[in-house]
Amino acid sequence: MAPCHPQSPTPSSGHWTRLLQSWGAVLLERFYPGRCALCLDPAPAGLCAACASDLARPGPSCPTCAEPLPFAGDCPSCQRSPPRLDAVWAPFVYAWPLSHLLLAYKGGGRPQLGRPLGSLLAEHLPLIATDGVDRVIPVPLHERRLVYRGFNQAEDLARALCRQRDLCIDTRSVTRVRATPSQQGLSRRARRANLRGAFAVSADLSGERILLLDDVMTTGTTLNELADAVRRAGAARVTAVALARA
């Protein structure tokens, strides 16, 4: 089995941007310690119990794509064309106020929200999702997007999950080799074409059980394309986790 590398790649300008953001988050925490990200009530984990209870939870869903269903079982789409993922878990629905938090975290200049969001994922993700996993691979960003944003939100969530569940995070073995345009507004077929060949795997994953992680899952195209790449590298089982399902 190839070793799992928990370290990030060599620091880029995105790394230093993120470091400055982290310092700002530390200062904010010093002056406004332990406050809920939504209502500002005391909350050591960053989100109070009352606000956390307001987050929409999914009902019955497809076990291999997390598509909401009126019944338990595989959705018609997965029956017609089985995905590259063996199972998917998404503990929350992408709806307000979680959607507000995620948007503020990724594009609203509030990197400190990574802490409560990571805690949410680790607390509410079923234990079966991480049972027997050899390594956790967050969906990588292309270098240009990483420099622009300053951090990878999927990596932040993965680090929080791995810390709390004693898992190995791998941020080196998979890279995003194509700077694909935004998936927003594209059809399922267009999303697949947009992401084809976007990921490259440099490690031998033969026989490993891989858990992929993203912040939000919409159609599942990104996670399935990444799953296809790690399967070609030899992975025996590939599952995925997203904080929320749109």
Image (cartoon, helix red, strand yellow):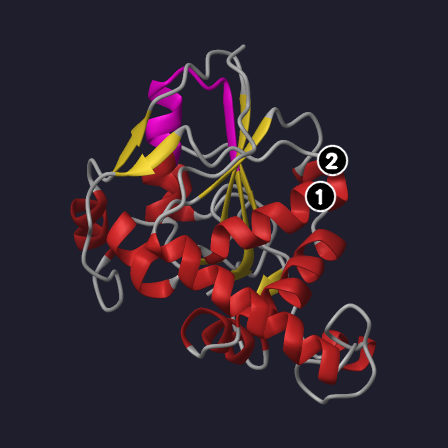
How packed is label 1: few (under 14 Cα within 10 Å), some, or many (20 or more)? few
Estimate the x, y position of residue 180 in percent, counting from the top left. Answer: 19, 52
Query: Going 51% across and 49% down the picture, which residue do you hit?
Result: 155
Could you tell me which residue is drawn at 20 percent across and 39 percent down?
A: 196
Q: Residues within 10 Å of mark 2 (few under 14, many from 20)?
A: few
In magenta segment, residue 236: yes
* Percent coordinates x, y for residue 214 in the rendering: 48, 51
Q: Looking at the image, can residue 81 be seen?
A: no
Q: Is residue 126 left or right of residue 114?
A: right
58 left or right of 195?
Answer: right
| Residue type at numbered disc 2 | Asp
Magenta stretch: give its range. 227-239
Tell me which residue sits at (46%, 75%) in the image. Answer: 103
The total of numbered circles placed on residues is 2
- Vertical side of 41 occupied by 139: above or below: above
Q: Pointer 1: what residue?
A: 163
The question of residue 17 being in magenta is answered with no
Q: Which residue is mark 2?
A: 166
Specify whether residue 227 is in view: yes
What is the distance, in whole Å, between disc 1 and disc 2 at their CAs? 5 Å
Q: Position of residue 69 (x, y in %)?
A: 53, 58
The three-letter code of the residue at mark 1 reads: Arg
Q: On the image, which quarter does residue 168 sit in? A: top right
Q: Toward the viewer: 189 or 106?
A: 106
Q: Is residue 198 above or below residue 95?
A: above
Residue 124: give x, y in percent of width and height: 73, 56
Image marks 1 and 2: residues in contact by CB distance under 8 Å: yes
Depth order, front residue of 38/236: 38
